[in-house]
Image (cartoon, grey):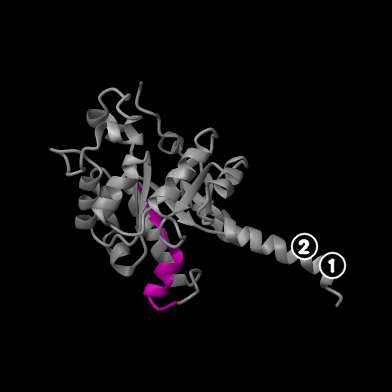
């Protein structure tokens, strides 16, 4: 069996790819999203109540669809990264990366020795299709896509070095954490925050890497697409459900 192709990594060809946050932590809900026309889905292990088994269920649920899964870990823990890779994650997003040294350590956590220190699971792991993928240990990195999140002043200050780190495939800006970190809580459209977002985008592209961002407000998403962001999350499943439910009930109770 050949190493599975990474559809997200293959899609980063210069056109903006639009995605949605998957926060319900169930394969059923994430599969529903996968039947829509989103290019990619973010299975969120940072703020959603996901565990390794629930992430596995979602990877299995979306495998039959063209929508590419991205998995976000809760932190930089190499043991967790190992587990997420072993269950078949090929595109991994890591939050709160502030330095090139942190980025390099994350790269090492995704590589087998001698390039890194990922532990060997062999035939125990879904990633190898239980030992059926030929030369998995030698080739796995070819289809991995490692995305690091820049969400602080330190991250922006080090954006050039972070993006230039070998093995980093993309940088994703977290506008809400960034705005909070620099004192503009809840206001990612403040001019200072916008300038920092643009700086990070330019630094990332200068390093030849892809850049992504979260932008659930349409005017923001269209601006970021015009700027040249390669992948943009334009929806959050929980917010979409909540808003649709509120609009539906308001049609019947609005006059009461």
Magenta stretch bounds: 170-184
**Nearer-the-camera pick, 156 or 125:** 125
The residue pinned by badge 2 equals 248
Q: Which residue is mark 1?
A: 252
- Residue 96 at least partly seen: yes
Contact? badges 2 and 1 (CB < 8 Å): yes
Residue farthest left in this picture: 114
Expressed as whole percent of the image width and height from the top left, the position of residue 175 reads: 45, 64
Residue 171 lies within the magenta run = yes
Tell me: 33 left or right of 232: right
Q: Residues within 10 Å of mark 2 (few under 14, many from 20)?
A: few
The image position of residue 159, as x and y in percent, is 30, 58
Q: Residue at x 29, y 35 (%)?
A: 124
Quadrant into which the N terminus falls = top left
Question: Measured from the top left, where is residue 205 in percent x and y?
Answer: 36, 47
Quarter occupied by residue 45: bottom left
Side of 141 where 71 appears, left or right: right
């Amino acid at each position: 069996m050949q190493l599975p192709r990474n559809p997200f990594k293959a899609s980063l060809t210069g056109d903006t790819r639009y995605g949605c946050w998957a926060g319900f932590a169930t394969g059923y809900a994430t599969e529903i999203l996968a039947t829509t026309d989103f290019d990619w889905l973010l299975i969120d292990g940072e703020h959603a109540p996901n565990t390794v088994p629930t992430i596995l269920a979602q990877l299995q649920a979306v495998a039959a669809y063209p929508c590419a899964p991205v998995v976000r870990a809760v932190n930089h823990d190499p043991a967790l990264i190992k587990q997420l890779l072993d269950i078949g994650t090929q595109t991994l997003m890591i939050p709160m990366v502030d330095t090139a040294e942190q980025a390099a350590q994350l790269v090492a956590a995704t590589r087998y020795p001698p390039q890194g220190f990922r532990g060997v699971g062999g035939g125990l792991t879904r990633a190898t299709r239980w030992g059926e993928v030929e030369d998995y240990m030698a080739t796995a990195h070819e289809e991995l896509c490692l995305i690091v999140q820049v969400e602080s002043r330190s991250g922006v200050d080090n954006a050039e070095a972070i993006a230039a780190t070998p093995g980093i495939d993309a940088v994703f800006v977290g506008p809400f954490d960034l705005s909070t970190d620099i004192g503009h809580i809840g206001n990612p459209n403040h001019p200072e925050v916008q300038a920092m977002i643009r700086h990070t985008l330019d630094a990332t592209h200068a390093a030849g890497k892809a850049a992504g961002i979260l932008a659930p407000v349409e005017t923001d998403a269209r601006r970021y697409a015009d700027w040249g962001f390669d992948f943009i999350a334009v929806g959050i499943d929980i917010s979409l459900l909540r808003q649709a439910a509120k609009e539906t009930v308001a049609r019947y109770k609005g006059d009461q």
